[in-house]
Amino acid sequence: MIRAQNLTKRFGNQLVFHDLNFQINDGEFISLIGPNGSGKTTLVKILMGLEKKSSGELLIDSKQTIGYVPQFRNIDLDYPLDIEQFIRLNLKFTLSPAKRKNGNEMIKTILEKTGLTNLKNRPLGLASGGEKQKAYLAQALLNDPKVLILDESTASLDVEVKLQLMDLVQELNRKYHLTVIFISHDYDLTKKYTKRALLFKNKTLTEISAQDISEDMFGMEA
Ligand SMILES: Nc1ncnc2c1ncn2[C@@H]1O[C@H](COP(=O)(O)OP(=O)(O)OP(=O)(O)O)[C@@H](O)[C@H]1O
């Protein structure tokens, strides 16, 4: 469980958000929405311990390891690693030495979970957009996180590929009780996949149900 009480963040004199009060339950698939510049990435950085809060409380169970899937970035055609080697990069950085010993087994399981087994030797630079995003997803899952943050991870993908990726995340959420925080500017996807949303508005967060999500909540101005 993740719980914030009066969480406030300033950069110098600039107030980014104030008095956030919310709870994200284990196994939830929740979206975090709001206009550009409203503070979504800043909140995620605070959740991941990469940025300090200014005041308030943030309670995260120490067992709640967090995996992060970034926005799609294209990768050069001559990128030297294949999909499996790319996923393997994270072994060194995120796993304890004891866990690393079982690295091959873990990679195999992750490839299966993400449907990449048959594509593991494909050079990442030649993989499709959806396959590249699955590789990022696989990397994020390697540390067996309890919480997965999708930070605009479906942006720039074709509609069909977006849906495939989201279906896969939904399956992981249901099968493994993985908590998913879905940050997106995509109205249709947030409506379709999440039941509850945290909406940034007037520099604070409001909780709404998916049926109350409307397109104007994704505007360009904070
Ligand atoms: N390190 C920083 N120093 C100063 N200001 C920052 C820093 N990081 C973010 N900001 C400011 O904080 C505000 C919130 O930015 P943030 O990136 O969290 O918004 P966002 O909701 O993720 O936006 P987007 O939807 O465009 O990704 C913006 O005004 C931004 O310029």
Image: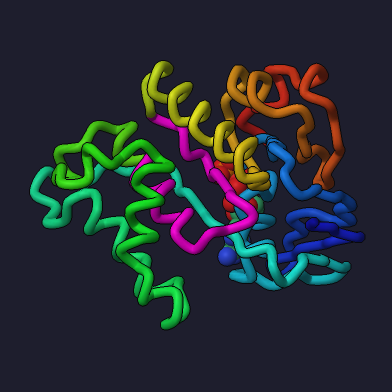
Residue 165 percent across, percent down from the top left: 45, 30
Q: Residue at x 64, y 19 (%)?
A: 192
Nearest the eye: 99 or 121? 99
Left or right of residue 191, residue 121 in this image: left
Say if residue 144 shows up in the picture: yes
Tell me if residue 7 comes above or below residue 92 in the rendering: above
Give the quadrant of the C terminus: top right
In the image, residue 191 sits, relative to residue 116, either above or below, namely above
Q: Residue at x 16, y 56 (%)?
A: 81
Front-most of residues 39 and 164: 164
Q: Residue at x 72, y 72 (%)?
A: 62
Does 171 sit left or right of 119 as displayed? right
Residue that protrudes farthest toward the left in the picture: 78
Query: Measured from the top left, where is residue 186 in percent x and y?
Result: 57, 25
Magenta stretch encompasses residue 215: no
Q: How is the image coloured?
A: rainbow
Residue 2, given in percent of the width and then of the height, sits at 79, 57
Q: Position of residue 164 (x, y in %)?
A: 44, 24
Q: Residue furthest bottom?
A: 97
217 or 118, nearer to the observer: 118
Say which quarter of the image contains residue 198: top right
Q: How many marks?
A: 0
Q: Quadrant of the N terminus?
A: bottom right
* Residue 151 is inside the magenta segment: yes
Magenta part of the protein: which range? Answer: 134-156
**Can residue 76 be seen from the camera position used here?**
no
Residue 199, compared with residue 158, is above or below; it is below
Residue drawn at x 76%, y 49% as measured from the top left: 26
